[in-house]
């Protein structure tokens, strides 16, 4: 059974759409303290950019953003500031092409792509073999995190993990975004994804990566794509070796990996999330003893805003996530 959450939404943001849209449009977060970027060369000779907050020998938390987001997303930088106050460093991974510069391969990022987080984890663990490390993912980044945790099983040295607003069954979530007001989110996300692909193609051509540019070119005209079912079939599946969109969704949905997780993991989901339906939520038999499911009645998608005074929001996740991490680092210690 899921745990009852203590989250109470702000009365002035009680609607799930307001919870979702308010921080995306109105929240501006300055860079956290001790902030610096490092570029890592990946095994396939591409790169990922990682934005760190904090130095020294403190515990380190890997952060994963959502679809069309980046390390500059308000929920990432806000959590970095909160973790810093609680005595933890953080490393915010920008998925390929999301750091402000297109990556050097046709390959992109997607909901099931776990090679880059594993590469970052291995890099950090090799550098700091004794440092307590945790990981937090939001939305698409949460799906990537849960899938990776399940794939790796007992092979990870992590003290805890948190996943928020996760599209646990990708097909159901893609269909949900075709309905009602959720279509507004779909339209904005697809617009950003098409822009991402155009920028990538231009960068590859201009930089002389002819073969990779050709792979993008062969996808054809993306302008008429109007749903995630179409985009994921035409772009994600073809670029990343899936037979089709059904194969991509079946292999990449994270719910099937929950039973194999061996790291103390908090999964925070809102029942009113406009990106999904209650059908995506797992049954108790599907969840590892290491996974704690916390359901809120309200909260929207990566919202979870409380506070009694209008326009003075309190971002509950920035209290709840550190609380979970500190609980388990203390147990480990």
Image (cartoon, rainbow, N blue to C red):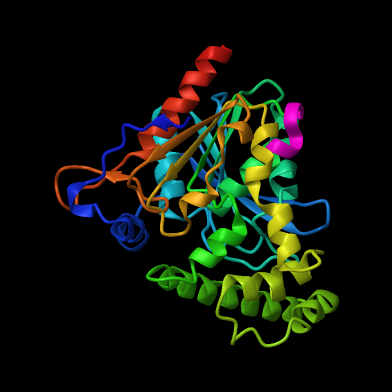
User: From this viewpoint, which residue is outermost toward the left?
Assistant: 309
Q: Position of residue 294 (x, y in %)?
A: 44, 34
**Residue 306, located in which quarter of the rendered image?**
top left
Q: Nearer the viewer, residue 85 or 158?
A: 158
Residues 283 and 142: in front is: 283
Q: Does residue 126 show up magenta in the picture?
A: no
**In this picture, residue 29 sits left or right of residue 208:** left
Give residue 123's position: percent from left, percent from top.
73, 38
Say above or below: 102 vs 289: below
Can the viewer see residue 57 in this picture?
A: yes
Which corner quadrant of the image does residue 184 belong to? Answer: bottom left
What's drawn in magenta, residue-wise? Answer: 150-155
Residue at 75% across, 35% down? 152
Q: x%, y% of residue 198?
A: 63, 80
- Residue at 75%, 78% (x, y): give it: 216
**Residue in view at x 57 percent, y 54 percent:** 140
**Relative to 305, 293 lies left or right:** right
Asked if 332 appears above or below 290 in the picture, the reply is above
Q: Quadrant of the C terminus?
A: top right
In depth, the one of 10 and 199 nearer the eye is 10
Residue 87 appearing in the image: no
178 relative to 109, above or below: below
What is the magenta segment's predominant secondary structure?
helix
Count of numbered tags: 0
Where residue 327 sits in the image (x, y, percent)? 47, 19
Residue under the image location 59 percent in, 70 percent down: 228
Name the side, left or right, on which 209 lies relative to 137: right
Q: Quadrant of residue 259?
A: top right
């Amino acid at each position: 059974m899921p745990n009852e959450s203590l989250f109470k939404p702000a009365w002035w943001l009680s609607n799930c759409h307001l919870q979702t849209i308010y921080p995306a449009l109105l929240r501006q977060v300055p860079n956290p303290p001790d902030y610096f970027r490092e570029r890592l060369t990946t095994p396939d000779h591409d790169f990922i950019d990682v934005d760190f907050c904090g130095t020294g020998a403190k515990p380190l938390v890997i952060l994963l953003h959502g679809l069309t987001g980046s390390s500059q997303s308000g929920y990432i930088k806000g959590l970095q500031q909160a973790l810093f106050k609680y005595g933890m460093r953080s490393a915010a991974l920008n998925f390929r092409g999301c750091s402000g510069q297109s990556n050097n391969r046709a390959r992109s990022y997607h909901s099931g792509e776990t090679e880059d987080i594993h590469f970052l984890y291995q890099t950090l663990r090799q550098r700091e073999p004794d440092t307590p490390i945790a990981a937090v993912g939001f939305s698409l980044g949460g799906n990537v995190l849960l899938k990776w945790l399940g794939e790796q099983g007992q092979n990870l040295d992590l003290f805890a993990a948190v996943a928020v607003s996760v599209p646990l069954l990708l097909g159901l979530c893609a269909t949900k975004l075709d309905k009602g007001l959720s279509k507004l989110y779909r339209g904005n996300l697809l617009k950003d994804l098409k822009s991402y692909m155009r920028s990538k193609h231009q960068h590859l051509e201009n930089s002389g990566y002819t073969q990779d540019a050709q792979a993008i070119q062969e996808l054809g005209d993306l302008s008429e794509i109007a749903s995630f079912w179409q985009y994921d079939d035409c772009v994600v599946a073809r670029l990343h070796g899936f037979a089709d969109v059904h194969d991509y969704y079946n292999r990449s949905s994270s719910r099937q990996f929950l039973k194999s997780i061996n790291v103390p993991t908090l999964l925070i989901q809102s029942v009113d999330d406009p990106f999904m339906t209650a059908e995506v939520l797992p049954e108790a038999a599907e969840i590892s003893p290491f996974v704690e499911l916390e359901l809120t009645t309200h909260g929207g998608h990566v919202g979870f805003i409380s506070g009694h005074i209008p326009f003075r929001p309190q971002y509950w996740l920035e209290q709840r996530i550190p609380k979970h991490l500190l609980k388990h680092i203390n147990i480990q210690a």
